[in-house]
Every structure is written in C-alpha cells, then in structure tokens.
C-alpha cells in the first residue's frame, strides 16, 4: 500500500537519499582501503562521474545561490575527516580568487557549466596561467591536487544563470588552511568554512 499511496515528491525524496547515500558508501569503502592518490582520483572520479550523470537527486536547499558570492554546502563530511562532499553553487557571473586546495580534489559538473583556469609559479614572484581555460559541462569531472596541479581560478561559465558542481576532497575541506594568490605570487591564507543551509 505504501507504494500506491506515495506521492511523486516522496519518490523523488527516496531517489535523492539513494543516489547520494550510495555514492558516499562507495567512496567510504574506497577510502577504507587507504588507496594511493592516483587510485583515488581514478576510482572516485568514476564514482563522481556516475553521480553527476543524473541531475535528479540534489535537495533544493543545497542548490541555492548567494546574491554576491558562490556558496559551498556540505553534503557529507566523513566522521574521520578523510573526505568531504560539497555542493558548490555559483550565481550568475560569480568566480573564485586564484586559490589552492592542499589535498586531492575532484569536481563533477552537475548543472550549468564552469570554467577553470590553472596557474603555476614561473618564479617566486610570478604566477602564470597553465594552458587554456577548461570548460566543464554536466557529467564531466576534473581533478586537482598538489602533485598534479593545485592552483586555479574557477568561474561560472554563465552570466545569466546558476551553475552547480559537486566537489569531493581528501579532507574536511571547510577546515583546511589554504591560500589565495595574486599574479605577483603573493599568498594570503584562508579557511573556507561552509555556507549555512537555509
Ligand atoms: Fe578549487
């Protein structure tokens, strides 16, 4: 009887919990094996690609853009802070400063599109772009880490609509001491924290 009396909203709720829960469980099992970074990026990247292949599971409260700045909503934080899963929501035209992560990270595009420009140090006082800007569209995944390139600037590809990407990191990223950078190489420390779900 439950099946015949459940509403469409109930079914969407069940799907929401299912997709994210399955993802978190699979990621936990992977991290339990204490894998190399290369294996994490490859296997967690595949899990994330599967998660963002469907845009029918993210609760609306985690998809709300801010009026001035991008928002980062925690979807799941591992109790041992081995990884975290974040809904990163861009309002129209919003962008990050040039920043680093200090741990491995994977970015999976869920809705809209974003552009990421990598940077590297050409000298102690000079930060320069590495290659061309990468445009991520839904279903695509990009990786960052100190060993493969950790400094970038990311922006919403759109000036007239929101975009959302799902990020996973090898730490409770909201608590990690990180840096923003100027093109003159000047670093400024920051801890991102998280946006409050309304
Ligand atoms: Fe980033």
Image (tube, rainbow, N blue to C red):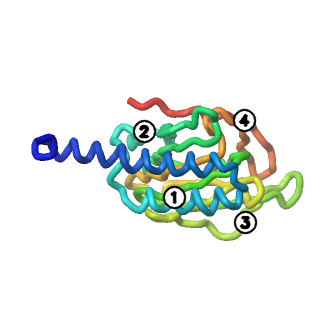
Please state, as top left, top right, bottom left or bottom right, where the N terminus lies in the image: top left
The residue closer to the viewer here, 48 or 74, is 48
Report the mark closest to the observer, 4 or 2.
4
Q: Residue shown at 65%/70% (left/top)?
A: 132
The residue closer to the viewer here, 190 or 101, is 101
Query: What residue would you read off at disc 2?
Result: 67
Q: Residue shown at 48%/52% (left/top)?
A: 165
Q: CA distance from mark 1 to mark 2?
A: 31 Å
Query: What residue would you read off at disc 3?
Result: 130
Residue 47, position as x, y percentages in the image: 51, 58
* Disc ID at residue 25: none
Q: Residues within 10 Å of mark 4 (few under 14, many from 20)?
A: few
Question: Sequence order check: which comes first, mark 4 or mark 1?
Answer: 1
Report the mark closest to the observer, 4 or 3.
4
The residue closer to the viewer here, 175 or 90, is 175
Determine whether the residue tagged by mark 4 lies in a helix, strand or loop.
loop
Q: Taking 103 as reference, is 86 left or right? A: left
Q: CA distance from mark 4 to mark 2?
A: 26 Å
Q: CA distance from mark 1 to mark 3?
A: 27 Å
* Residue 176 position by quadrant: top right
Residue projecting furthest to the bottom: 132
Q: Residue shown at 69%/54% (left/top)?
A: 35
Query: What residue would you read off at disc 1?
Result: 47
Query: What residue would you read off at disc 4?
Result: 177
Query: Disc 3 vs disc 2: Cβ atoms closer than 8 Å?
Result: no
Residue 61, position as x, y percentages in the image: 36, 37
């Amino acid at each position: 009887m439950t099946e015949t009396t459940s509403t469409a909203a109930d079914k969407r709720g069940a799907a929401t919990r299912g997709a994210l829960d399955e993802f978190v469980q699979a990621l936990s099992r992977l991290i339990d094996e204490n894998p190399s970074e290369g294996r994490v990026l490859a296997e967690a990247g595949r899990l994330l690609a599967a998660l963002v292949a469907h845009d029918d599971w993210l609760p609306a409260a985690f998809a709300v853009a801010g009026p001035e700045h991008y928002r980062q909503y925690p979807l799941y934080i591992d109790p041992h802070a081995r990884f975290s899963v974040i809904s990163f929501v861009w309002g129209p035209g919003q962008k990050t400063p040039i920043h680093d992560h200090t741990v491995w990270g994977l970015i999976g595009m869920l809705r809209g599109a974003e552009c990421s420009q990598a940077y590297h140090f050409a000298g102690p006082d000079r930060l320069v772009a590495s290659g061309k800007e990468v445009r991520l569209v839904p279903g695509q995944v990009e990786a960052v880490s100190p060993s493969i390139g950790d400094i970038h600037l990311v922006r919403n590809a759109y000036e007239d609509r929101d975009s959302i990407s799902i990020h996973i990191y090898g730490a409770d990223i909201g608590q990690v001491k990180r840096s923003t950078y100027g093109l003159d190489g000047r670093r400024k420390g920051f801890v991102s924290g998280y946006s409050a779900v309304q």
